[in-house]
Image: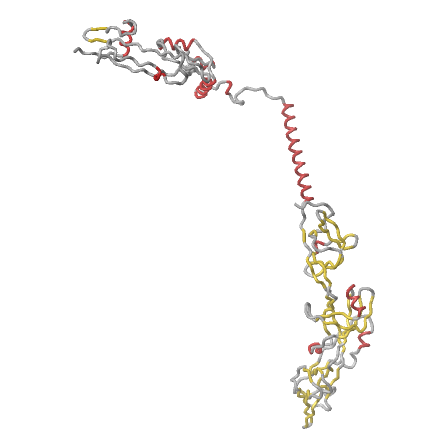
Amino acid sequence: MGRHDVKSTKQTREKTERVPAEGKGIAAPASTGDAVTWPRRPRRRPDLSGAAPGKSMASEAPAQDVSDGSAPSGRGKLKWPIRPRSQRSVRLPDLHESGAASGQISRRPSRPAETEAPERGGVSWPAGRRAEEPPRSARADAGKTVPQPLSPLGTKRAEEKLAAAGNVPPSRRMPEDQPHAKEPWPVRFLRVVLATGICALAAGFYFLWARQSAEEAMPPLFTPQPYFYEEEQPVHALLLWHEKVLTAPSGGTVQLAYGGKAAAVADDEVVATVLTRGRTIAIRTPARGYFLPAIDGAEDHWDYPTLWLGSGLLPKAPELRWVEDLKPLDTAVRAVGKLIYLPQEPRAIFYLDLTDRLRAGLERGSISIRRESKGPKWTARVRVYVKYGDERAKVALDMPYFPMDMALSREVDFLVCSDEDAGLVVPDSAVTIRHGTYGVFELVGDRLVFRSVTGKPIEDGRFFIASGLSAGNPVILEAANAEEKRVRLW
């Protein structure tokens, strides 16, 4: 058995070209020296005229008859059908220095194909294996000299390569890279004026909207609260009562039964004992009342005619002079104290500032008094009063109470009260004066309405409204600068 050398593919092609094929059989081998080289059997090309696009070429190509007796067994190399490669009609161009500098793009011509299938999507696909390709030098020369138009895909890729190389095609240049003519100064000036005018107009509309919103915005409101009001006027009054000074028949050392303190005593009770010339004299009370071991010297001339007549200031009450226990009596007076009879209603004389309700109480003949604010109220009977104009009056009334501490001084302070009145109370800032009358701005629906009210200021910066305002509707908290208008509730 002879030795077979396997030649390169190139040598096999050259020898195959020299040996012509006869019919469909295999050509005779060419012998070169000791080695026998079998010629390459040409491949069968299937007829794809009726083949469907996209179908595998190897599946329809007929298989070679490897059992042919003309091919010796064990000699040569058997090759199975190869699936032809698809060839695109669009190829990337070869960029040369001359073409990149001038902005033109050249491309290689596509390799010819024997039979082409119908085009699909603008790309031609070969139906079979390409014919024998020309040498590389010929293909390169053809690509240089025969420029062909590019498809959008090729153009895009070429422009990307140019951008990577630093050369930007004119179609892809940015606006700032492209030269443009400079605008004349009147056009630029007009553009600046128009932009400024638009900004000023927008700012003016904004300020008008903000002002209208502020005017229609809901101002601070206050809901009036129910309140029971009564007038309390402090007065300073002088007291008149029935009293009697208790004296000893002779001078001596006095011993007080209650040790120099005021006390409520019964009728015919011993309140003091006087030691004189070795004997004891008991001092008894003529009636029931308050015993005070003191005198002020006004017991004889402190009477109603003296205090009531005249419109001047009331006199000041004298102070008490207390009798000392176990001390000698004053020989000129020999008084051990005085007795204020009980029961009795002391009479109080004072000046009163008149109001509508207090004037009504005086005309009715009774007013209410308190010893202290928010304390128990007492009804006092008015004996007589004299008006000095419409704002002031001198009043004499019977005190409805007479405690012991009131007997220590002829002066007393108390509060004169009017009848209770139900109304509403608001802050002072919610009330303003228009045309000489008090008024508030009441919110009725979505409008502010001015309401005239009657009332008076009270303590803690509040204002009592007796009439003119209905409960439930809020009022403006700051009424000094308010006006009647429509407001936006939401």
Q: Position of residue 396 (x, y in %)?
A: 79, 73
Of the 4 image quadrants, the one containing the C terminus is: top right
Front in this rendered view, residue 281 or 163: 163
Is residue 17 positioned above or below 244 on the image?
above
Q: Is residue 41 left or right of residue 300?
A: left
| Extreme-bottom residue of the structure | 278
Front in this rendered view, residue 490 or 281: 490
Q: Which residue sits at x=63%, y=28%?
A: 192
Q: Position of residue 168 (x, y in %)?
A: 48, 19
Front in this rendered view, residue 41 or 453: 41
Is residue 122 positioned above or below 315 on the image?
above
Q: How many marks?
A: 0
Q: Is residue 199 left or right of residue 381?
A: left
Which image quarter: residue 371?
bottom right
Q: Is residue 92 left or right of residue 380?
A: left
Q: Position of residue 224 (x, y in %)?
A: 69, 56
Of the 4 image quadrants, the one containing the N terminus is: top left
| Extreme-left residue of the structure | 1
